[in-house]
Image (cartoon, rainbow, N blue to C red):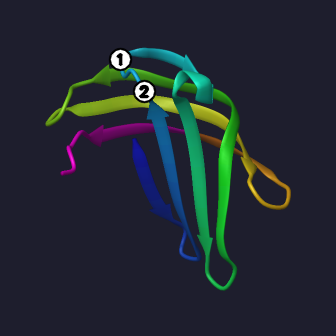
């Protein structure tokens, strides 16, 4: 699931990945294919990238291509350069598409 948003001065992109998608709650664990990341583009400061070190992704419904994916997520993400952590939390209800 890819999510994009802005607050006027920053652009945020969150990516949630589950390798074997089905409904349920999944603990973040890169070895199991369950990951979350956050990219923040700040005007004048560039790009900051964060990767999840803990958290969960919940898939409430998964309709397949042409359907909708609905669920929620909460993850503690850590900045890849420098220091800093952020709690990434929210809900999603997005159309499922395929990109060729």
Report if the CB atoms under discs 1 and 2 are less than 8 Å apart. no
Q: Which mark is residue 22?
A: 1
Estimate how packed mark 2 is, as few (under 14), some (14 to 19) or many (20 or more) residues with alpha carbons within 10 Å.
few
Q: Quadrant of residue 81?
A: bottom right
Q: Residue furthest front?
A: 31
Image: 35 above or below 10: above
Magenta residues span 90-100
Q: Quadrant of residue 79?
A: bottom right
Residue for point 59% across, 77% down: 9
Q: Who is closer to the viewer here, 50 or 62?
A: 50
Q: Is residue 28 visible?
A: no
Q: Who is closer to the viewer here, 52 or 11?
A: 52
User: Which quarter of the image is occupied by the N terminus?
Assistant: top left
Question: Taking 8 as reference, is 50 left or right?
Answer: right
* Callout 1 secondary element: loop
**Which percent across, then down, holds residue 47?**
63, 70
Please tell me how many numbered marks the rendered image carries. Answer: 2
Q: Who is closer to the viewer here, 49 or 9?
A: 49
Question: Taking 6 as reference, is 43 left or right?
Answer: right
Q: Is residue 2 visible?
A: yes
Q: Which mark is residue 19?
A: 2
Residue for point 34% across, 37% down: 93
Q: Residue furthest top?
A: 24
Q: Which mark is residue 96?
A: none
Q: Quadrant of residue 18?
A: top left
Question: Taking 92 as reference, is 87 left or right?
Answer: right
């Amino acid at each position: 699931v890819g999510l994009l948003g802005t607050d006027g001065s920053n652009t945020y992109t969150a990516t949630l990945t589950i390798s074997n998608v089905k409904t349920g709650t999944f603990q973040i664990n890169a070895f199991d294919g369950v990951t979350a990341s956050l990219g923040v583009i700040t005007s004048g400061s560039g790009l900051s990238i964060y990767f999840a070190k803990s958290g969960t992704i919940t898939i409430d419904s998964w309709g397949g291509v042409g359907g909708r994916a609905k669920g929620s997520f909460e993850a503690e993400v850590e900045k890849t350069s420098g220091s800093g952590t952020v709690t990434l939390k929210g809900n999603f209800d997005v159309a499922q598409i395929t990109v060729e």
